[in-house]
Image: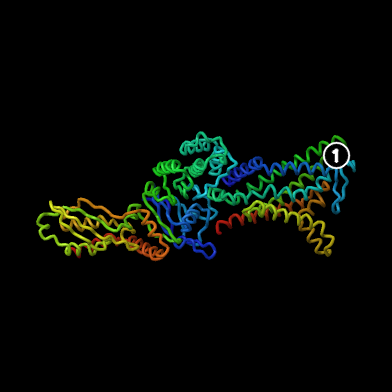
Amino acid sequence: MRAELGTLAWVFRREFGARFDSASALTVTVVFALVAHGLFFFLGHPVGDLQLPSFWAGGVASLQVVFAWLPLLFVGLIPALTMGAWADERAAGTDELLFTWPLSSRASVLGKFFAVWAFLGLALAIVILPLGLVTASLGNLDWGTVFGGFIGAFFLAGACISLSLFLSALFSEQLSAFLSSALLLGLLWSAGLLVHALPAGLADAVNYASPYAHFFDSAARGVFELKDLIYHVSLMAAGLWCNALVVEGRRWS
Amino acid sequence: MIDMIHVHGLEKHYGDLRALRGVSFDVSRGEIVGFLGPNGAGKSTTMKILTGFLIPDGGSCEVAGQQVLPGEPASRRAVGYLPESTPLYRDMRVDRYLDFVAGLHGQERAERKASVGRVIDACRLGRHAGRRIGWLSKGFRQRVGLAQALIGDPDVLILDEPTSGLDPREVVRMRDLILELGQEKTVLLSTHILSEVEATCSRVIVIAGGQLVADATPLEIARSRAAEMTVVLRVPDEDLADFDAKSIGRDFAHVPGVARLVSAVDCGGGTARLVLDVNRAPGSVALSGEPVAELVADTLAKRGWKLSELTWQGDSFEAAFLEITDPEHLDHRARAHREATAKAAQPGDPQGKDETEQNEGETT
């Protein structure tokens, strides 16, 4: 167990460091931060059930606008961060060495997952913290709801990352991995908008299955609930399990 | 000799393609074994199975006494592997990459530092340790690939075409490095450069169409193609008086590996020269490892004649390789090889002993 944690930590170190060496990862993170700040200050959130004015227009000391936008921003950001995680290994053939070194598939899958999750957590902090400081300096910001929203967004990101990594493992081209992942996350996000068009029972089921519903209805409003945590962790475990199956399945191919 | 690699009945399918068809072989400690075959023969598949990257559909393999099992990293500690395309993380510095590999091998800080230093010295990477792998030339990247294979100080090295794409100077350096490593480690080496095999390998395993078609020394394989053997011998004067080619021919009729006596000439001065047609049939003794020259010498000795010179004509390793991997005769060769191997493996009934006894019975 200790040895497995050790190898997991080494994969984490390598993958986390690689994100800082990747021009595309850094560029997309900077774009993510700039777009999030722009939306918060100037556009607000005029989409779906959660309609909110921009910070300057509304003059409310709350980060709810940025939390409301995060799920859609994740549709572009997360596939960009995960697309190369497995697809690149496969294209370059480095997975052949990775799986002949003495580490388990589980350690490599978890190491990659935690590296992307930690990098995204950092990107999230870079977005939220300056906004929080600016808002707090101009009004009475409730840091508790900011923290709840941050934790909720972080766990939502974890679930999305595990699904995207699974899709990355299915492809040997980064573009295919990116497109399939963006399509899946986009569909999950838009499910929240489409539920009104569905019959009541089906709408409830779709709403419950959507990871975004477990964010919009709670954490995005500053309330982080245990059932949402369980949902996101379960989705993460399912994504990682599928990822490990695909990776291990390559040995049989 | 202890078997460091034991492969038994390996089978692997890629869809409808049967890539490996019951491949079996052993490699002992300290051997440098060439693993040859045409493209698509199944070499890389076998190597990937040995390193644990692929799981076979049938058969088994052991490395350094550990069975290679899916999801079990233990056997992988005993193997250092350099894949054909030398896949490396090009965004990493050489020293950090090697440190990362050492970390995956479970080494602590001091041990990692020592290991990285050791392999950097062994692969002569000192001046490039701080450079990004992507900036290195192909030759140096190949050395980094070899360095990562050595980091856990494995007993077994599996090198898939380590000199592929290198310039001649780098090829010589890599060959010297492999020879140096072979003094301590067991090396299974795949290559298409046959001169490299003759220069570095003590034994050659040839695979074609997913089947083993030869397992012998490079010299034996070369001689398996040889058309003729010329023997110069010293013959007592009384024997030279009635030097009879027919009677000598009968002696050689049952010597395995010899098809017939072509000529027997009295050269004067107590010497004679025999020219023998060597049997090159698939699975012939030369291919299965039987020392034909020794059997010829034994046959001469029974007549009281002394062998003073023996030369082979037409023994080219390259020609032999092309012939034994000829797609038209693969099944026949593989079957003959299996039969020869099985016969040699029968306890208390080794092939050589059997045939020698048979010869003795017929020549006396």
| Image: B36 above or below B116 | below
Specify the color scheme: rainbow
Pick the quarter of the image with the C terminus of chain B: bottom left
Residue depicted at x 78% and y 38%: A129
Q: Residues within 10 Å of mark 1 (few under 14, many from 20)?
A: some
Expressed as whole percent of the image width and height from the top left, the position of residue B9 reads 44, 61
Identify the amino acid type marked 1. Answer: Leu
User: In the figure, residue A180 lies in which quadrant?
Assistant: bottom right
User: Which residue position is annotated with label 1?
Assistant: A141
> Is B62 or A98 nearer to us in this picture?
A98
Residue depicted at x 50% and y 52%: B51
> Is A89 or A245 nearer to us in this picture?
A89
Expressed as whole percent of the image width and height from the top left, the position of residue B40 reads 48, 58
Residue B40 in sight from this viewpoint:
yes
- Outermost residue toward the right? A58
Expressed as whole percent of the image width and height from the top left, the position of residue B257 reads 28, 61
